[in-house]
Amino acid sequence: MNKVSSEKKSSLILAVALILGLVIGMVLYMALTKIGDYSNVISAFAGALVAIFIPLWQTYVIQKSRLSLEVNGISRKVSEKAKISLDEHSELVFLRKIKGREARTPFFIVDGLPKRTPPDRAISLDELEDLLNKAKQELKDAPEKIAERKANLEKINSFTKDNFTKYECGKLNRPLHPEIEYNPENVESTLEEFKKHFEESLSELKEKHEELQSSIPAIERKVHQIKTELIENRSFFEISATLINSGRLNTSIKRPALFRVYIGKENYIDLKLTLNDFEVKSEISPNSTVVSTFSSTDISQLPEEDRKLINTYWGQSVQCKLFVEDVHGEPSGSNSIAFSEGLYQKIIFDRLAVVATSHSI
């Protein structure tokens, strides 16, 4: 049921009622001018009708809620319960190393010996993409770090036992843990320790840079493959909508909602939704709006045929609508939007761009 059509119908009925009331009033006036003896009785009867009619009119026509809704956008997200095991994919070896460096699990004393619990290798898609971004950042930073290590090595080679002081030793020690101790009795050995450290560090950085250069493309392809599989099988939909109450009485909507995707003549897919933050977002005051979010269940719970249809038509220009029901059982339908993320916003941006172009400075 379309809420806009219902409001137009109510307005039409109101207009007809006003015209009909005017005609009846004119007829009564003409009758009263011809009937003198019963004019008081008829006037009293008409007054009683008006006295009864006005409160009923206010209650059922004026003092009521008028709910409408507009879908602002639709997004598709991977369920947080969907996990990826880094150990199952050989392409993600470098990401396992990053995860291992970041793991700081607590240790426990078992039989008098400290033992750590193994880090959890099962991660979410967001964590996987975060690890990929860190690997790409390390690849980006590697040339600068290699150049820095080369500069440090050249600086160390420029020192001799006569010009290498404790102060210079302190400057070189700043990034080192543990530090190399300055030995005034044998400065050459101190310089050799620094030289050995920075040569090993430079060699490790070069190896890491080569590994990143060869691994990143394969990692990106694998992450893309995993993301595609999760979206097609373990995702859910979030619909953002503005609920508008243009009436004079507050109203509330029920938690369940329906999102229908029209894929052809008399063909559609129904997604069952629930209102997020129901206790806060369900009530709409008179002449006010509430921006709410509805979430679907994981599409893995849908029949396989419906999942295939969703994956086929997602991102296409097929239309879809949101339907809700208020506490009085009155259904309301939203505007139509494309079954695609960001397309509705793009249409609005394009319209605004046209308006902005027409308003030249």
Image: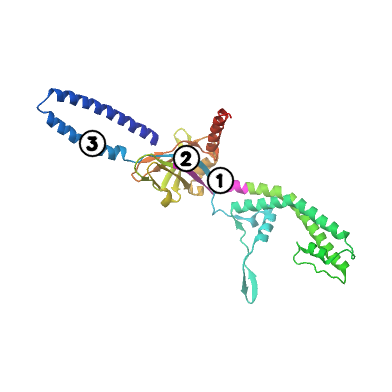
Q: Which region shows up in magenta? A: 225-242
Magenta-span inclusion, residue 239: yes
Local secondary structure at mark 3: helix
Q: Is residue 231 above or below residue 359?
A: below
> Where 100 sits versus 314, above or below?
below
Q: Mark 1 is on which residue type?
A: Glu
* Within-10-Å neighbours for mark 1: few <14, some 14–19, many 20+: some
Q: Quadrant of residue 162?
A: bottom right
Report if residue 19 lies within the magenta region.
no
Q: CA distance from mark 2 to mark 1?
A: 23 Å
Residue drawn at 63 percent across, 62 percent down = 119
Mark 3 sits on what residue? 53
Report the amino acid beneath label 3.
Phe
The label nearer to you, 2 versus 1, is 2
Q: Outermost residue, front direction?
A: 361
Q: What element does badge 2 sit on?
A: strand
Q: Position of residue 339 (x, y in %)?
A: 51, 38
In the image, taking residue 320 as reference, residue 329 lies left or right, namely left
**CB of mark 2 within 8 Å of CB of mark 1?**
no
Q: Which residue is mark 1?
A: 232
Residue count near mark 2 (Cα–Cα under 10 Å), binned few <14, some 14–19, many ≥20: many
Secondary element type, mark 1? helix
What amino acid does circle 2 point to?
Val
